[in-house]
Image (cartoon, grey):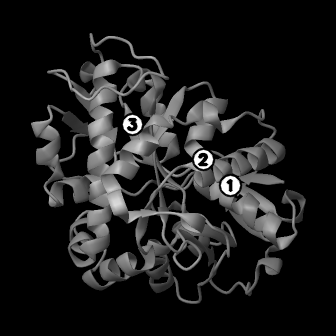
Amino acid sequence: MTDRVPTLRRAAIAGTTAIATVVGLTACGSSSHPSLSLTAALPTTVPAGTVLRIGDPAAQIAIQAAGLDKELAAEGVTIKWANISGGPDSIKAFRGDQLDCSAVADIPSLFAHWTGTSTKIVFQSVTVDPLSYPVYELGIAPGKDIKTLADLKGKKIAYSAGQAQGALVLRVLQKAGLTKKDVTLVDLPSTASTYNQALGSHAVDVAPLGTSTIVTYLDQYPGSSEIPTGIRDDASNLYCLTSAVQNAGKAAALRAYVTARTKALLWENTHPAQYAQLYYEQNQGLSAANAQHAVQLKGLTGIPADWTNADARLQATADLLAQDQGNTKFNVSEVVDPRFAAVEAAAAGSDVVTGGAS
């Protein structure tokens, strides 16, 4: 059962002068670089004039703070940064040929496939201890007595089919032994503070909230609470238009970007206080105390030695969504470019993670 509530007003996201909006990026999208087969080796030389249009705000901060933007420039890579992340906005920009790549969780690549937008995952990272440092917890509306997953039965739950939060809700119901018929799924895309406001106004009883926003939510709405999902939810990807990966110049630039992004995420691990200030405090507007808390909740980012386990988890998610949402089953190898797995592993060197965290 699904209800639709009016979309709550999107909160404004503060930009910085270093980040270009997607307006004006379209002109940079065309290129005369030769086509590259998806099975060919990635080129290592970036042709002059190569431009990547990337929506990766969190990694952008780390890349610039660590001085890796200078390394990219030295290799001939020009990046037009876009203040875009997440599935709905990135897929819209892809369709308008306004973006080459964007940072997302695992779901957008699946929905891009199901809705006819061809993309490839070129970067996958994990959380070193994913169950101890979840990305999401379940926010509970003020005054609602929900203490366990079993208590979700009969409740109104915020649900966004095309976002990571939507898949998380389905997996939580599965873990609780419930089905969609046991709850009311409220069709509500998660943008900015939408879910916080929906909980606070009792439009929904439960909503998946990022752990970095939980503190803000609990402070803002007296009587509110949260419970853990107990589910691994650490999938973190960079996906790109297939046409970008097939462009020899952009593929070479992406090889360099994946290397820099790997180093930037590992830099975050060793500079938590600096990253908290630059990203959570200055870019996201959190207080200094909440910014430091957000970094602590985030845990350490891991670069997997290979993508075998991550791809298996992606396949399981795709199968669940196909079953519960009526989408066509497919092999997720269609949306993954395995050539970049070795690139990021090489960039991480001895810092790669293996086993359960991979």
Residue 294 occupies which quadrant of the picture? bottom left
Residue 137 image point, x, y percent: 59, 74
Depicted 266 relative to depicted 112: above or below = below
Identify the amino acid type marked 2: Ile
Q: Which residue is at the front of the view, 310 or 51?
A: 310
Question: At 26% across and 65% down in the image, what residue appears?
Answer: 267
- Residue 107 is tagged as 2
Label pair 2/1, CB-CB below 8 angstroms: yes
Residue 282 image point, x, y percent: 22, 67
User: Pointer 3: what residue?
Assistant: 101
Confirm whether residue 164 shows in the render: yes
Depicted 300 relative to depicted 98: above or below = below
Q: Which residue is at the front of the view, 133 or 176?
A: 133
User: Pointer 1: what residue?
Assistant: 167
The Cα–Cα distance between marks 2 and 3, rounded to whole angstroms, is 15 Å
Question: At 78% across and 41% down in the image, what residue appears?
Answer: 322
Question: At 83% across and 45% down in the image, what residue appears?
Answer: 323
Quadrant the N terminus occupies: bottom right
